[in-house]
Image: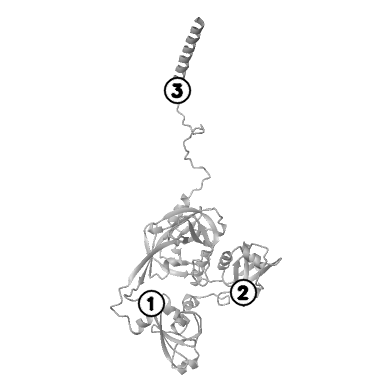
């Protein structure tokens, strides 16, 4: 019993001592919060790594050089009428009770200042058909802008405001952009001025078939930077604050950003700007080939053992490529030192050059590699600069002109006029004009040459009245709308 008592007392004293030690230890210990796997949870560190990408410098440079472009154009409305009839307007007048007061239509977009003396690049679709164009800078100053030139085929336009010492973005090199590289989109979406978003380059040389023109050039840079309506014409810049693209389009079923946006490469835009400054028109070069991308189906059908390059499935008779020796079935895989893997890449490379420029075109023909030096032509089949008189006004008419002979003018008793030599699809054919017709007046203005036609119709909107004579002496009048 004495032994049992001793053990019990000892156990009791030991238990009390252990409990006391544990109690005081708990009182002095710091609390530790542990995760389920018993690993201590640490507070998150907000220190920025030294090698982290910083967008602040690029953003600060860009917002001051990106402008808000607003346009106004007059739109005539006619009550109880589904169309505007220029023939009715010129010959009989529109009934006053049916015509309503023209309603101004307002639109907006963005633009990028590219020089300190006020030259601004934007999209053609932002300013097309505008009667008035206003530009608001980031510091709230507002200017009236004039159009230096436009190119619907690349969806670019060049504007000018009268001001000096403006902040501008330096050109970068869009060829050096790499997939996954960070870029910023700067513009005025939904009229929210000076908005900056960031994303990466998702793809290059994208053709999304959005430009509805005869000779479209689509080789877009794709990005996931958020771009919305109003961003059109704004800047895509790299992390150095250099201009590498002009934001132009989004891929969306709703009209708002859905994850993909597209910009015109600045290397292409720069060439268009240079042409507009020098000639007032883009000097579009043609290589004279019809091409298609190489996919598995085509490779199997044509027994092609390479997957790189583009397949030549046709040639323009007398064109640059045909003259140099290119043949149907050839595969173009490089132009100068630039690899070509899609039709959009080839179109972009050719579009960066002017008629008269020489390109080294690398071709695979069977097992043979051939290099041809090809001199590019213009759309007329020569290397001469295309001036304004041969530009979009004449293209819209769809005609070729020549001066009538002195005998023709004497026989008809006229002192001025320009003769319709050939007709293609265009406004004149649609109006009913035939080849051989001599245009003497447009909207009561005397016409002596092609330049007079351009001056009479350039920037003209609405009804047009054309007067003239056929070789048999019949005097005719034609009306149509622009």
The mark nearer the N terminus, 1 or 3, is 3
State left or right for residue 308 relative to residue 433: right
Q: Is mark 2 on a helix, strand or loop?
A: strand
Give 179 or 265, whichever is nearer the viewer.
Answer: 179
Q: Which residue is drawn at 55% across and 59% down?
A: 204
Q: Position of residue 411 (x, y in %)?
A: 46, 95
Q: Residue at x 49, y 42 (%)?
A: 48
Q: What residue sits right under mark 2 in the picture?
A: 315
Q: Cα distance, mark 1 to mark 2?
A: 39 Å
**Residue corresponding to mark 1:** 462
**Near-viewer residue (104 or 458):** 104
Q: Is mark 3 on a helix, strand or loop?
A: helix
Judged left or right of residue 310, residue 283 is: left
The residues tagged by marks 2 and 3 sit, at their Cα atoms, a distance apart of: 90 Å
Quadrant that contains the C terminus = bottom left
Label drawn at residue 26? 3
């Amino acid at each position: 019993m004495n032994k049992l008592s001793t053990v019990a007392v000892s156990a009791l004293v030991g238990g009390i001592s252990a409990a006391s030690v544990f109690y005081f230890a708990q009182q002095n210990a710091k609390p530790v919060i542990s995760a389920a796997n018993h690993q201590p949870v640490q507070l998150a560190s907000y220190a920025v790594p030294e090698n982290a990408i910083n967008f602040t410098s690029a953003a600060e440079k860009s917002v001051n050089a990106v402008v808000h472009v607003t346009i106004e154009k007059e739109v005539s409305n006619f009550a109880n009428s589904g169309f505007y009839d220029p023939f009715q307007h010129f010959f009989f007048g529109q009934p006053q009770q049916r015509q309503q007061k023209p309603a101004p239509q307002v639109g907006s977009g963005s633009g990028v200042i590219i020089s300190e003396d006020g030259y601004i690049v934007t999209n053609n679709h932002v300013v097309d058909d505008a009667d008035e164009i206003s530009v608001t800078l980031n510091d709230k100053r507002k200017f009236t802008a004039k159009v230096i030139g436009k190119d619907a085929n690349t969806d670019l336009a060049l504007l000018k405001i009268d001001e000096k010492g403006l902040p501008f973005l330096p050109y970068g090199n869009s060829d050096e952009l790499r997939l996954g590289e960070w870029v910023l989109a700067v513009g005025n979406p939904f009229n929210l001025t000076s908005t900056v978003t960031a994303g990466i380059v998702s793809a290059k040389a994208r053709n999304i078939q959005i430009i509805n023109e005869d000779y479209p050039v689509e080789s877009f840079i794709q990005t996931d930077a958020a771009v919305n309506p109003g961003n059109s014409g704004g800047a895509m810049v790299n992390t150095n604050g250099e201009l590498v693209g002009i934001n132009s389009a989004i891929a969306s079923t709703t009209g708002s950003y859905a994850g993909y946006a597209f910009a015109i490469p600045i290397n292409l835009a720069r060439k268009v700007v240079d042409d507009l400054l020098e000639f007032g028109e883009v000097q579009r070069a043609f290589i004279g080939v019809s091409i298609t991308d190489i996919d598995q189906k085509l490779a199997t059908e044509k027994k092609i053992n390479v997957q790189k390059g583009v397949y030549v499935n046709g040639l323009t008779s007398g064109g640059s490529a045909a003259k140099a020796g290119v043949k149907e079935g050839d595969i173009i895989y490089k132009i100068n030192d630039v690899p070509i893997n899609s039709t959009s890449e080839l179109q972009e490379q050719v579009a960066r050059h002017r008629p008269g420029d020489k390109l080294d075109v690398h071709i695979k023909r069977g097992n043979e590699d051939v290099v041809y030096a090809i001199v590019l032509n213009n759309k007329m089949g020569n290397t001469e600069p295309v001036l304004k008189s041969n530009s979009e006004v004449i293209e819209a008419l769809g005609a070729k002109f020549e001066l009538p002979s002195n005998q023709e003018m004497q026989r008809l008793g006229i002192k001025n006029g320009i003769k319709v030599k050939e007709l293609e699809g265009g406004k004149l054919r649609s109006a009913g004009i035939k080849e051989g017709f001599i245009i003497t007046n447009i909207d009561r203005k005397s016409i002596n040459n092609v330049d007079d036609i351009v001056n009479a119709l350039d920037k003209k909107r609405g009804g047009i009245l054309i007067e003239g004579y056929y070789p048999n002496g019949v005097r005719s009048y034609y009306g149509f709308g622009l």
